[in-house]
Image (cartoon, helix red, strand yellow):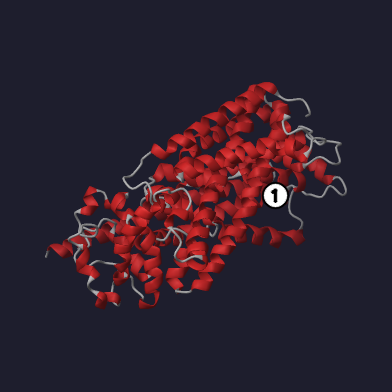
Amino acid sequence: MKDVNVPALVVFVLFFALVTVMGFLASRWRRADDAAHLDEWGLGGRSFGTWVTWFLLGGDLYTAYTFVAVPAAVYATGAAGFFAVPYTIVAYPLVFLFLPRLWSVSRVHGYVTPADFVRGRYGSRPLSLVVALTGILATMPYIALQLVGIQAVLDVLGVGGGEHANWFVKDLPLFIAFGVLAAYTYSSGLRAPALIAFVKDALIYIVIIVAVIYIPIRLGGYGHIFDAAAHKFSAPKSGGSMTLPDNKQWTYATLALGSAMALFMYPHSVTGVLASKSRNTVRRNMAIMPAYSLMLGLLALLGFMAIAAGVGQGDKKFNAQLSVPQLFADMFPDWFTGVAFAAIGIGALVPAAIMSIAAANLFTRNVYKEWLKPTASPRTRPGSPSWSHCWSRSARWSSCSAWTSRPRSTSSCSAACGSCRPSWRSSAACSPAGSTTGRCSPAGRPAWRTAPGRRTASPARPPSTSAATRPRSPASARSATSA
Amino acid sequence: MPFFYWYQLLWVPVSAVFTVAAYLLINRDEKARTAARKAGGAR
């Protein structure tokens, strides 16, 4: 483990270089006219179709936690670590119910973060602040977890100096990785992780399919793998079990259910959802996301394979987090180990980038601008050097409160709309087709701008537009007003 | 493979089938509503 695995390291670095280049090029990918806008940087212009969203959400939700920590938990505790499988099974049907609605409301009012939604829906600034801070707090350890995942891979690769190196040498590769991540996230916004997610998921699927076929062949079949795991956990004080003991069953079930309910409370998951271009894209994705859950289940079984392969056997101090990387290194030829490690490493970078973007959105919109410096120059926002340009245009749009439903949320509306409204004109919703509908055209605007009396009835609909010609689907407007 | 593992893995495709069915049903319903509204608007 102290020797550097050169072929694997070369492959790993090559893939890492590839995604770095992609990350910087991503700023040109599907670029809209108004690249300076937060919708562009933080939500990719709200234009991602079904497949991009699928890869993005997959890249977003299935993180280094999935590749390293879940199998590690199965390796160490057996059945209890498998909770991630029922968790993802329950999650998608659950959010199928409310995410399309969240999407529609956010689209209509220009919300970018969950805290924006709370601010607009409940009209409470403190509540919105609490939601924003909770989101940031919950995201930070999650980002840290991604770094732990990268570190586990680097450890097994032999870079990072081992136990005796000083902290700087040990963490240097990590600093480099995170610096690169920060640089391309800054320049490309959400487009970078969305594009890299394609590479990541392709690699992950290849590695998993190879792993669940090739490793059992080398280890003597699944029967043998489960026997080996059962043998390990039958030992006294093994700290785990093959099935759940009676007193752990409720823990298991509630852990799965609670995690499922929390999944789309994470700001980065909401960011991924809001970046999609239509309500149906969201629904469709909830139906096809379980393909990832299957992968997760197979990944969890890698923990048992690591047991059967004798990873860490006899080493009392063996770090369970290293079990899967070590399994790959032991089982695969060196070059494929590099591919597998690149998959884990990039699999950590994509969510780390999205989480950083989500946390940045929360901080700038809901903490900094809202509480610390209401007059903040829009340039202080991340990733958008020419922000003021958007701000000035958005001022004209602050009158959008006329068509939000609740008078009490007027100020919050202008805050939310003030930052987002202009992008409508450049995003898919207001593409040439949309701009003829009166919603975006200058001619149509004054019509509802001067109609404050319309605040009560079904206000999200500008009076000058009919249901058939509005750019978004009638269904989305319907639910947006009722929500 | 013990029951605990294959049964939970089995539910992944099963729940996916249910969600896809729900998606198709909702889609059909929305199309029907849109069509009904258009027909109403033409009058």
Give the left or right position of residue A260, taking residue A153 as reference: left
Q: Is residue A153 left or right of residue A123?
A: right
Residue B21 visible to the viewer: no
| Quadrant of the drawing holding the N terminus of chain A | top right
Percent across and percent down for residue A334 are 67, 23
- Is residue A462 placed above or below A300 in the rendered structure? below
On the image, which quarter does residue A337 sit in? top right
Report whether residue A137 is seen.
yes
Q: Chain of mark 1?
A: A
Instruction: Tell me how many marks there are.
Output: 1
Location of residue A24 in the rendering, given as x and y in whole percent from the top left corner: 47, 36
Q: Nearer the viewer, residue A29 or A468?
A: A29
| Residue A134 location (% of width, % of height) | 59, 63
Q: Is residue A436 above or below residue A176?
A: below
Extreme left residue here?
Answer: B43
Q: Residue at x 59, y 55 (%)?
A: A139
- Which of the image's four quarters has the C terminus of chain A? bottom left
Q: Considering depth in this image, is A143 or A297 the residue closer to the camera?
A: A143
Q: Amino acid at mark 1?
A: Gly
Residue at image coords 84%, 41%: A317
Percent across and percent down for residue A221 are 69, 31
Question: Does A458 sit left or right of A342 as displayed?
Answer: left
Q: Nearer the viewer, residue A174 or A346?
A: A174
Pointer 1 local density, CA inside 10 Å: few below 14, some 14–19, many at least 20 = many
Mark 1 lies on residue:
A81
Closest to the observer, A311 or A366: A366
Against A130, residue A2 (above or below) is above
SS for callout 1: helix
